[in-house]
């Protein structure tokens, strides 16, 4: 027979309130009482009612993401790996993970509704902006959140990210070592924090190598296959052409590779290409990439951070930076003479 809170309290000769507070770790219950209650609960096989426990703690046992979902996200292995790992990590904690797709114009209203209705215990904020209204709002409301990426904020906040400076620096060092001087960069929208940081890292790395950057070699707003394709067409129209291209996201990287193939460019000989992110879905095998290792572990890590934040860990202690790795492939080679 399963012991409930009432029978456990009777067995201990305590009130249900005292036993509940002891089981849930309230600080006003002294250590001796807590130990006595926990020992009795284990001996009698007490099992908490998860719904009642959630209500008592004011929790939903749900974490969420409000996401301005694009069509490309549904076929994006990076997005699916991270979100899938988050869902698995929350299930292991006896919780649920919800992804709430919204249109960009209704995103802030969705945040407001989610908080006012107290529908989740915490949120992951994806695709952080350089100046992010969502993060400012959550910080002002003192609501638990973990940013998947960084932003400009005047107070500590919890975030998980990869080191954009280190990844781009590796790419430029590798290309310069192959004799490249005319290097271009294709970027996503520069209001996205990762794109802005990678662009700045590119300019800094080129400056450190002693090579000027032709403004024509900087193309932005390339966030999918079509815009990546068009970006390469612009670069091929330059005279002189760049001898190497760094693409800051994998979706436009697929379009960039396709454009070079359609133009009859021998990739790795006439033009070298490095793409940030996974590149399985391409006609060219073994693309040279800046890899973000452990995407599934990254999803789990953000759930772990969000749970810690909800349970009282300071946001300043929950800032995690992982290192990307350059993985050379067939799309890079010596600069053509």
Image: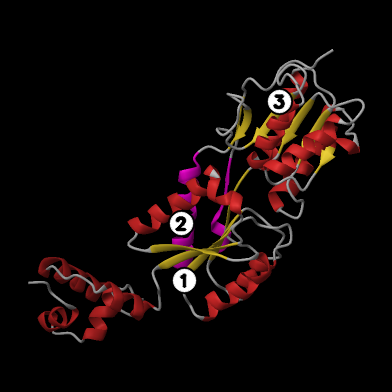
Circle nearer the viewer, 1 or 2: 1
- Gap in angstroms between the C-alphas marked 1 and 2: 13 Å
Circle 2 — which element?
helix
Crowding near the residue tagged with mark 2, few <14, some 14–19, many ≥20 C-alpha atoms within 10 Å: many
Please tell me whether residue 135 is drawn above or below residue 259 in the rendered image.
Answer: below
Magenta segment, which residues?
Answer: 294-322
Circle 1 — which element?
loop
* Quadrant of the rendered image containing residue 115: bottom right
- Gap in angstroms between the C-alphas marked 3 and 2: 41 Å
Q: What x and y, as percent, mark residue 320? A: 56, 50
Residue 120 - label = 1
Residues tagged 3 and 1 counted as in contact (Cβ below 8 A): no
In this view, which residue lies farthest toward the left? 1
Circle 3 — which element?
helix
- Gap in angstroms between the C-alphas marked 3 and 1: 47 Å
Q: Which residue is mark 2?
A: 303
Q: What x and y, as percent, mark residue 195? A: 72, 47
Is residue 14 visible in the rendered structure shown here? yes
Which one is in front, 335 or 7? Answer: 335
Is residue 312 visible in the rendered structure shown here? no
Please tell me whether residue 177 is drawn above or below residue 223 in the rendered image.
Answer: above
Residue displayed at 34% across by 80% down: 56
119 to the left or right of 195: left
Crowding near the residue tagged with mark 3, few <14, some 14–19, many ≥20 C-alpha atoms within 10 Å: some
Which one is in front, 274 or 256? Answer: 256
Mark 1 or mark 2: whose residue is earlier in sequence: 1
Q: Which residue is mark 3?
A: 261
45 to the left or right of 123: left
Residue displayed at 90% across by 38% down: 215
């Amino acid at each position: 027979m399963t012991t409930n809170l009432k029978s456990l309290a009777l067995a201990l000769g305590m009130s249900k309130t005292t036993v509940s507070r002891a089981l849930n770790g309230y600080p006003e219950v002294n250590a001796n009482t807590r130990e006595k209650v926990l020992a009795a609960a284990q001996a009698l096989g007490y099992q908490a009612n998860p719904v009642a426990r959630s209500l008592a703690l004011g929790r939903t046992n749900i974490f969420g993401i409000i996401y301005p979902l694009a069509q490309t996200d549904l076929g994006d292995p990076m997005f699916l790996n991270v979100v899938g790992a988050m869902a698995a990590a929350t299930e292991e904690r006896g919780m649920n993970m919800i992804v709430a797709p919204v249109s960009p114009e209704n995103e802030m209203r969705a945040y407001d509704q989610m908080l006012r209705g107290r529908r989740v215990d915490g949120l992951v904020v994806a695709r952080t902006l350089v100046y992010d209204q969502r993060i400012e709002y959550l910080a002002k409301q003192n609501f638990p959140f973990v940013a998947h990426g960084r932003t400009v904020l005047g107070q500590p906040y919890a975030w998980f990210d990869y080191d954009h400076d280190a990844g781009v620096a590796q790419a430029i060092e590798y290309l310069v070592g192959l004799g490249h001087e005319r290097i271009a960069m294709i970027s996503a929208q520069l209001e996205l924090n990762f794109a802005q940081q990678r662009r700045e890292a590119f300019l800094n790395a080129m400056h450190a190598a002693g090579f000027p950057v032709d403004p024509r070699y900087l193309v932005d707003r390339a966030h999918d296959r079509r815009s990546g394709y068009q970006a390469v067409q612009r670069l091929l129209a330059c005279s002189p052409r760049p001898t190497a291209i760094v693409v800051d996201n994998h979706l436009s990287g697929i379009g960039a590779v396709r454009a070079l193939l359609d133009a009859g460019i021998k990739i790795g000989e006439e033009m070298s290409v490095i793409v940030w992110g996974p590149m399985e879905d391409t006609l060219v095998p073994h693309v040279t990439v800046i890899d973000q290792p452990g995407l599934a572990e990254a999803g789990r890590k953000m759930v772990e951070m969000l749970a810690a934040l909800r349970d009282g860990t300071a946001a300043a202690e929950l800032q995690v930076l992982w290192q990307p790795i350059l993985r050379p492939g067939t799309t890079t080679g010596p600069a053509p003479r």
